[in-house]
């Protein structure tokens, strides 16, 4: 066995080079953390899979440095419709082209391999990252708070190395999950479906969104994913049906032309959550930690949220003296949200089928009636990312207000140019205020090595000022993932729970970053 040992600069080892693993590597690289990505395939897995994302995840891709590249392969979508067995609309969950995070609320993209290629291209440009393909990881452990041993096999034989941390992004059959002794919690949904991707120039009946056909005999999903690419998903059952017959309801009645079946594959959709996501410095992300049916398009999204939540915390522990308790918040924050999304997807699955028992028709009738309740569709569309529950990194005791929610991302002006808010704020914490920062706020900003920024200086369209006013806040402390960690209430002078989170961050006083120039006096010094 070849033994490779690393000292204090041991890299973070990421097992799996799918979208979650590579995004995690890019997010860590932007914070100066070295990563080694181990992947069993030599190249991108070629079959199309995920094809939809939301505005929050578009913001994560922006943070990973691939926002513009992803825009080139994405297209806004209208949202989701529920159709009955005769394809009559029962409900619409409309999505807008400008969401809270600065992107369309729903975007379709060509296919997962296209996303993976642009992520890998970005990875190749980062000197902090190394990708090794054709590698089979054979062991992970021990799972301590120190270095973690990883063993793997390639064409040159067996190897061993030590990692500062291990991120298991190795899918539903995760070796990492087995290594930490985690087991699945079954959320009671399992169905076999066939997924068909078709390329055709036919005038396919399409509303530029996702259709869920609520038919207990043949529930199905349909969406346009590219200029001439379409996807259908049908639950399996009974006799096999030719593809043309399955998709005929969406094609012109007179159409007898050809179409190309890009993919036809069968999958088992499951709803599961791992009972634990961390052991020492070993973590589970993506499908290694949770499995969701695809009915609300959140499988990939949930995995990228995992990466965004964990990577800034891990970087802080490895580089800035953050307390190990900071890493405990990964599971406590992400697991409830993942469970919430899975339950929504399961509920959508039941809405599509109504079940197979004698009460199925009654449930479908109740669904149709519920969909006519004013405001229900709009509320359901906003429920994919509820506020984080109170904890060490979200002001304790908060049930309402801005704490635990995401800051909006409008366009702002800096250096005489128009840019997105996150590009201006960078990768660290930030304080936004309704007025000029006062001395105690400047002192806190100095201690965190950040700046307190009046939103009136940002040159946006008033979005941030309106958001603070609606949340009854004079200032907010934003985490690197743009979640509000603490709030100065309207009329107050200080954040409400500094002692609660300061010890977890284990903050070390750092010099302020260089002050950028701007045409409007942007980013005033916190020492003013």
Image (cartoon, rainbow, N blue to C red):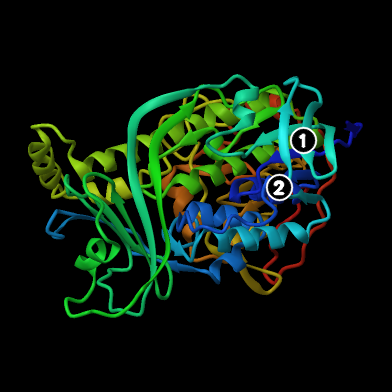
Who comes first in sequence, dot 1 or dot 2?
Answer: 2
Which element carries disc 1, helix, strand or loop? strand
Indicate the position of residue 477 as horizontal and vertical percent values. 61, 41
Residue at x 47% of width, y 54% of height: 50
Residue 35 falls in image quadrant: top right
Residue 152: which numbered mark, if any?
A: 1
Residue at x 60% of width, y 27% of height: 177
The residue closer to the viewer here, 141 or 474, is 141
Residue 445 falls in image quadrant: top right
Quick one: label 1, few (<14), some, or many (20+) residues within 10 Å?
some
Res 31 visible: yes
Check the image and report above or below for 287 versus 497: below
Quick one: label 2, few (<14), some, or many (20+) residues within 10 Å?
many
The residue closer to the viewer here, 435 or 23, is 23
Residue hosting label 2: 25
Which element carries disc 2, helix, strand or loop? helix
Check the image and report above or below for 479 versus 81: above
């Amino acid at each position: 066995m070849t033994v490779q040992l690393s000292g204090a600069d041991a890299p973070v080892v990421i097992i799996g080079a799918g979208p979650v693993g590579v995004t995690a590597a890019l997010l860590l690289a932007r914070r100066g953390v070295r990563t080694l990505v181990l992947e069993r395939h030599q190249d991108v897995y070629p079959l199309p899979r995920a094809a939809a994302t939301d505005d929050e995840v578009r913001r994560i891709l922006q943070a990973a440095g691939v926002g513009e590249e992803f825009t080139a392969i994405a297209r806004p979508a209208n949202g989701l419709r529920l159709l009955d067995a005769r394809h009559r609309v029962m409900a619409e969950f409309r999505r807008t082209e400008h969401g809270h995070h600065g992107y369309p609320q729903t975007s379709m993209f060509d296919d997962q391999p296209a996303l993976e290629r642009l992520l890998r291209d970005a990875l190749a440009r980062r000197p902090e990252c190394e990708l090794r393909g054709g590698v089979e990881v054979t062991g992970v452990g021990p799972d301590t708070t120190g270095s973690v041993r990883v063993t793997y096999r390639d064409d040159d034989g067996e190897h061993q190395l030590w990692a500062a941390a291990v991120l298991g992004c190795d899918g539903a059959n995760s070796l990492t999950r087995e290594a930490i002794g985690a087991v699945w919690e079954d959320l009671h949904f399992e169905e076999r479906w066939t997924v068909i991707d078709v390329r055709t120039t036919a005038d396919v009946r399409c509303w530029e969104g996702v259709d869920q056909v609520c038919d207990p005999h043949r529930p199905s999903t349909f969406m346009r994913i590219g200029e001439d690419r379409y996807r259908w998903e049908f639950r399996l059952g009974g006799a096999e049906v030719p593809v043309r017959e399955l998709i005929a309801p969406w094609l012109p009645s007179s159409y007898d032309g050809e179409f190309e079946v890009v993919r036809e594959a069968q999958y088992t959709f499951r709803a599961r959550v791992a009972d634990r996501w961390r052991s020492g410095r070993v973590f589970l992300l993506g499908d290694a930690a949770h499995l969701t049916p695809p009915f609300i398009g959140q499988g990939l999204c949930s995995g990228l949220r995992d990466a965004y939540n964990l990577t800034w915390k891990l970087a802080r522990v490895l580089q800035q003296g953050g307390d190990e308790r900071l890493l405990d918040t990964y599971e406590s924050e992400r697991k409830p949200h993942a469970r919430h999304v899975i339950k929504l997807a399961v509920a959508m699955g039941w809405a599509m089928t109504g079940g197979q028992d004698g009460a199925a028709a009654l449930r479908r009738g109740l669904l149709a009636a519920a969909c006519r309740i004013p405001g229900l569709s709009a509320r359901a569309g906003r429920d994919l990312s509820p506020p984080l529950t109170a904890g060490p990194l979200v002001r304790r005791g908060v049930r309402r207000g801005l704490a635990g929610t995401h800051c909006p991302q409008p366009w702002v002006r800096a250096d005489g140019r128009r840019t997105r808010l996150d590009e201006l704020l960078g990768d660290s914490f930030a304080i936004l205020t309704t007025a000029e920062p006062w001395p105690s706020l400047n002192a806190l900003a100095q201690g965190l090595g950040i700046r307190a920024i009046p939103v009136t200086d940002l040159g946006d369209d008033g979005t941030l000022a309106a958001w603070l006013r609606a949340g009854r806040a004079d200032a907010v402390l934003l985490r690197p993932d743009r979640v509000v960690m603490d709030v100065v209430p309207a009329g107050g002078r200080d954040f409400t729970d500094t002692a609660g989170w300061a010890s977890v961050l284990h903050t070390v006083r750092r010099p302020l970053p260089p002050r950028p120039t701007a045409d409007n006096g942007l980013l005033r010094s916190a020492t003013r």
